[in-house]
Image (spheres, rainbow, N blue to C red):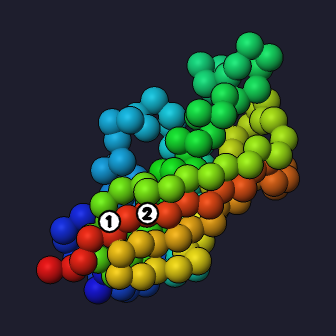
Amino acid sequence: RIRHWGRLVPEGGDADRMAAAREALERSKPYSEGFDLEVIEATSELVRVRMAFAEGLTRFNGTLHGGAIMTLADAAGVVSATLNTKGELAGTQQFNISFLRPVSGGHVDAVARTIHSGRTSVVLETMLEDAEGRTVGLVTQTQAVRAAE
């Protein structure tokens, strides 16, 4: 079983993981409320969260604002860490992003993979992809973990 903000999530099949991933994304709100985030995939290897392009999230030049992309990446990391932690997730401890190309339409997917899951932290790598599958950014983040009770 996996601890999920104080509750135990079954380590069942992909359907159980999808349900747990969707619940974890809902718990990340209200901050991400206006970003139209959706869990697309949640397996034992990765979590994919999608954000649709929206005019309200753009910069003056019509490209997605970096803060919106960071919100997507952080949410995907939190969902992945929630599903793969050995304790109770405490929150983002470190976040580093490299923007590689702008996004001016379609959607952005954040594909998060757990690199390390330890007693006090979870380290994740998240690839950001546009609707054509091109890499638009790369994120590494560390999520702090409290020991399971």
Question: Residue 108: image x %, image y %?
Answer: 69, 45
Q: Which image quadrant for residue 84? A: bottom left
Which label was assigned to residue 144?
none
Q: In this rendering, would 34 be left or right of 65?
A: left
**Is residue 53 placed above or below 144 in the rendered structure?**
above
Disc 2 to disc 1: CB gap under 8 Å? yes
Q: CA distance from mark 2 to mark 1?
A: 7 Å
Residue 32 coordinates in the image, percent (x, y): 43, 38
N-terminal label among 2 and 1: 1
Left or right: 30 as drawn, with respect to 114: left
Q: Is residue 123 above or below residue 70?
A: below
Q: Amino acid at mark 2?
A: Gln
- The residue wearing badge 1 is 89
User: How many numbered circles does the render carry?
Assistant: 2
Q: Which residue is mark 2?
A: 143
Q: On screen, 32 above or below 60?
A: below
Kindly identify the amino acid type of the residue bearing the numbered disc 1: Leu
Picture quadrant where residue 69 is located? top right
Residue 39 at x, y = what percent? Answer: 51, 56
The residue closer to the viewer here, 8 or 71, is: 71
Residue found at the far top of this picture:
60
Q: Residue at x 45, y 29 (%)?
A: 34
Quadrant, the C terminus: bottom left
Q: Is residue 113 visible?
A: yes
Graded by Cα atoms within 10 Å as few (under 14), some (14 to 19) or many (20 or more), the crowding at tag 1 reads: many
- Residue shown at 65%/56% (left/top)? 139
Question: At 33% across and 69% down in the image, what residue appears?
Answer: 145
Q: Choose between 31 and 87: the one closer to the eye.
A: 87
